[in-house]
Image (cartoon, coloured by chain):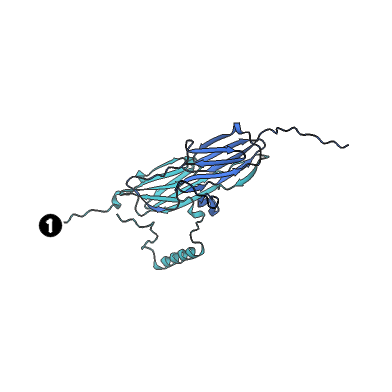
Amino acid sequence: MLWPELERYDFGRSLWRELDTLQRDMNRLFSSYGERTEADFPSVNLWAGENDAVLTAELPGINSEDIDISVHDNSLTLNGSRKAEELKEGETYHRQERNSGQFSRIVRLPFKVDESKVNANYKNGVLEITLPRAEEDKPRKIAVKAV
Amino acid sequence: MSSKEAIQKQETKTPEGVERTKAKRTFAPVVDIIETEKEIVLMADMPGVDENSVDITLEKNVLAINGGVEEKAYEGHSLAYSEYRTGDYARSFTLADEIDKDNIKATVKNGVLRLVLPKAKPAAKKIAVKAA
């Protein structure tokens, strides 16, 4: 199976928009190479298999009911929030490095997902989503007959 | 969510010339430290760690947090795209206050370590200074 990097180009779009995207990507590449922004939270890893993919993300300290996952065609959306610690009177922060607040991330997958068979579990702060490839999206094998 | 530091995991710093014996990557977990009237509460983000794989030591005034994470591989799958790496966690802190070492409580939930360090009652008696 062909596994491109998370595909970026959709040839259905017009050339102008394509150039626009390219320019943005180039700007991003030169101005902040390697840096990632809020829109890239949480970081994800994608494991590719023959008929499915497993997406993992590190989301410590979130209740599983506060994570909202939706899948449509080949895009996966992760929404959620982490509550900040509420300080009582007389309590002070010595350090505050952990982030809180809302997050939203959209990941484009290299294939169409069977939405009804998506499975997600959350353990020890790691989210794991299994995304089976839609049946109609799977490549067809074509038998070659000898004449 | 903000700041790129928290989005990208930072590897644990080691003193110059000192290397770890394990060739595994080690990250410094991000922490919140809150001081209350009676205790110091430390919370550390350590995704992948559970109550059995975290190890905390307090020697003199140095609090060391270590967490082991097993590298997970999915059978029949290959890592096609990666934004974060996994590895162990290690970070140490020097504590300023006297801590009641026998009553430290540690819990791990959803990959977050929560350490409650009660402050020790002052052992020395305060001596009031009177104006002569």
What percent of the width, then of the height, locates residue A15?
Answer: 39, 68
Front residue of A63/B129: it is B129
What percent of the width, then of the height, locates residue A19?
Answer: 42, 67
Residue found at the very far right of the displayed protein = B132
Q: Is residue A64 left or right of residue B127?
A: left
Within 10 angstroms of label 1, few (less than 14), some, or many (20 or more) residues? few
The residue under label 1 is: A146
Instruction: Look at the picture and state if B76 lies above or below A15.
Output: above
Q: Quadrant of residue A4?
A: bottom left
Callout 1: residue from which chain? A
Q: Is residue B76 left or right of residue B111?
A: left
Residue A13 appears in the rendering: yes
Residue visible at 49% across and 65% down in the picture = A30
Identify the chain drawn in cyan.
A
Instruction: Look at the picture and state if B104 lies above or below B3.
Output: above
Three-letter code, disc 1: Ala
